[in-house]
Amino acid sequence: MRALTLVFDLDGTLVHTAPDLMATLNMILAREGAAPLPLEQANALIGGGARVLLERGFAANGRTIDEGHMAELYRDFLDHYAEHLAEHSRPYDGVEAALARFQAEGHVLAVCTNKVTWHSRKLVEELGLAGSFKAVCGGDAFAWRKPDARHLTMTIAEAGGDPARAVMVGDSITDVSAARNAGIPVICVDFGYTDVPARELGADAVVSHFSELDHTIRAIAARFGA
Ligand SMILES: O=C(O)COP(=O)(O)O
Ligand SMILES: [Mg+2]
């Protein structure tokens, strides 16, 4: 098969980051006198990046925070999370092996995430995944972020990939929308962070394990032609 460009979402797709994200969120909530939120609520909170996570965390407490104070809390969130991002976060089962297979097959691999770029790079570095990717582009890498198509297409460009032979792999409506907006096929994992079931997100295919990804990608790539 000719080389493909495989673009992965990070939180909820490659790595189960909810425990560390929720722990940092709960540290901030507690400091502000708000109630901590259970891990199960991560599905409805993660996906839009750290600032959105904070806003949703306070909203779940019936609180709105003024912009100036939110900017301060956001900085504190970033600092605290940076020191704890790989404490409990682990790649999902089969991720390392799948990335190694895709790399050995000559595909171009990249990460397109709404996490801030330096956190994303630190996380993949600490988990030993960094060598797999030609580009890791966070929500602050460009002037646009998912669901804007340009976050995806500019990530592909930075990786030296081919947008006409690219497939997105994600876990949420943000990923499906970004891929649709870019005219790129999208596969969803069903174990990530979404409050709508993965099968209802309108992806081209849904997988339950990374071992299912190879044949799913091959089936989709058949549409690209030789
Ligand atoms: O951290 C988030 O909220 C989103 O990150 P993701 O785009 O990798 O899912
Ligand atoms: Mg995600």
Image (spheres, grey):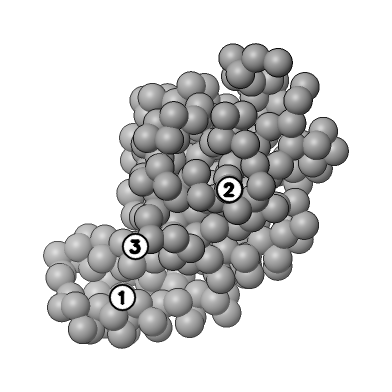
Which is more foreground, mark 1 or mark 3? 3
**In the rendered structure, are the residues bearing label 1 and label 3 in contact, judged by CB atoms less than 8 Å apart?**
no
Dot 3 beta carbon under 8 Å from ligand 1: yes
Residues 39 and 53: in front is 53
Label 3 crowd bin: few (<14), some (14–19), many (20+), radius 10 Å: many
Q: Is residue 194 above or below residue 36?
A: above
Amino acid on which disc 2 is placed: Ala
Label 2 crowd bin: few (<14), some (14–19), many (20+), radius 10 Å: few
Spatial CA distance of label 1 from label 2 is: 38 Å
Residue 225 in sight here: yes
**How far across and down, in percent of the image, does residue 214 sit?**
71, 26
Residue on which the image places disc 1: 29
Label 1 crowd bin: few (<14), some (14–19), many (20+), radius 10 Å: some
**In the rendered structure, are the residues bearing label 3 and label 2 in contact, judged by CB atoms less than 8 Å apart?**
no
Q: Secondary structure at mark 1?
A: helix
Residue on which the image places disc 3: 53
Residue 33 in sight here: no
Q: Which mark is residue 18?
A: none
**How far across and down, in percent of the image, does residue 1 sit?**
77, 22
Amino acid on which disc 1 is placed: Leu
Q: Residue at x 37, y 55 (%)?
A: 144
Q: Which mark is residue 157?
A: 2
Which is more foreground, mark 3 or mark 2? 2
